[in-house]
Image (cartoon, grey):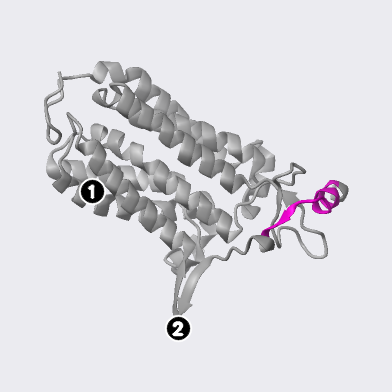
Amino acid sequence: MILPILAAAVGDHIRFESLGLHPDVFSIGFFTLRWYSLAYIAGILIGWWYLLKLLAQPGAPMARRHADDLVFYATLGIILGGRIGYVIFYAPEMFLHPLRIVRLWDGGMSFHGGVLGTSLGIILFARKHKLDWLRIHDYVACVVPFGLFFGRLANFVNGELWGKPADVPWAIIFPHTVPYPMLDPARHPSQLYEAALEGVLLFALLAYAFWRTRARYYPGRLVGLFLVGYGIARFTVEFFREPDRQLVAFAEATGLHMGQWLCVPMIAGGVYLVMTSTKRRTRVEPIAGVESVA
């Protein structure tokens, strides 16, 4: 068990420290700006900008004035859903120490929880403005890969959520991944795998479906593609990623990581939305954009 780890560690691999990366952008007094915070801000702002471009196209389900309000609901859903989801799925012991739950700066966010929180926020937003909540989900799904991309890059900069030991040429030796005095093994940079699949590839898939096909006129098709694409990408990368330390026993007992189990209903729900989207096709009257779409 130890020999493969030692063998991976002594190979000619990049040491994480040599990359010169640090979780903090800068500190002034008691204030510290972290790359993880910037990742959230960049994902929201760039996603907002791209959403406005999507809404300028024919048959949009809401206007720009709605998008400004939606950002508030979505941001609240991301933060609350992501944190509560992390506590429920990955760290339920926090319920015994409630003050730890609100310490967001200590890390711990669940993407699956964030999806549920954002979805609930969109539904509440749509009810308030009497809009089609499923079509809004379609448009929001197209912008989510921005946040995923920046978030995974921030995970890499933080040197967290690293992958399993590996001897591939691009493996990286992250510090403090095994107990002292064992040597840290070279590992898959699984954060970058996820940035590529969940960020770049998923964005390309949804952009093609939006701009080159008529998928946006079939309510549920785009968000369904997102759920399937993300679910498959995350499920696959988890095979190269170490499970959370507190969930190692769970992964060994069930054969899959918690993240993989959470992806199963996502994939199933996405397939359902895509397969049934044709039945939901109706005449799309514009709330934004330049024309009606029959």
Instruction: Say which amino acid is labelled 1.
Output: Leu
Residue at left offset 57%, top offset 54% = 156
Q: Is residue 260 visible?
A: yes
Q: Between tags 1 and 2, which lies in front?
A: 2
- Mark 2 Cα shell of 10 Å, populated few (<14), some (14-19), many (≥20): few
Is 283 or 257 nearer to us in this picture? 283
Q: How many marks?
A: 2
Most distant residue in the bottom direction: 29
Is 51 or 78 nearer to us in this picture? 51
Q: Quadrant of the C terminus?
A: top left
Real-space CA distance between mark 1 and mark 2, rounded to the nearest whole angstrom: 34 Å
**Which residue range is magenta in the image?**
4-16
Is 194 or 74 nearer to us in this picture? 194
Mark 1–mark 2 CB contact (< 8 Å): no
Residue at left offset 41%, top offset 36% = 203
Task: State left or right for residue 19 relative to residue 84.
Answer: right
Residue at left offset 50%, top offset 66% = 106
Which structural element holds mark 2?
Answer: loop
Which structural element holds mark 1?
Answer: helix
- Mark 1 Cα shell of 10 Å, populated few (<14), some (14-19), many (≥20): many
Instruction: Verify whether residue 15 appears in magenta.
Output: yes
Q: Position of residue 213 (x, y in %)?
A: 31, 21
Q: In the rendered view, would you say 162 is above or below 58?
A: below
Q: Position of residue 272 (x, y in %)?
A: 38, 23
Task: State left or right for residue 282 relative to residue 14.
Answer: left
Residue at left offset 26%, top offset 32% = 134
Q: Position of residue 274 (x, y in %)?
A: 36, 22
Instruction: Say which amino acid is labelled 2.
Output: Gly
Look at mark 1 in the image and give the residue it sits on. Answer: 70
Task: State left or right for residue 241 relative to residue 198.
Answer: right
Q: In the rendered view, would you say 39 is above or below 206?
A: below
Look at mark 2 in the image and give the residue it sits on. Answer: 29
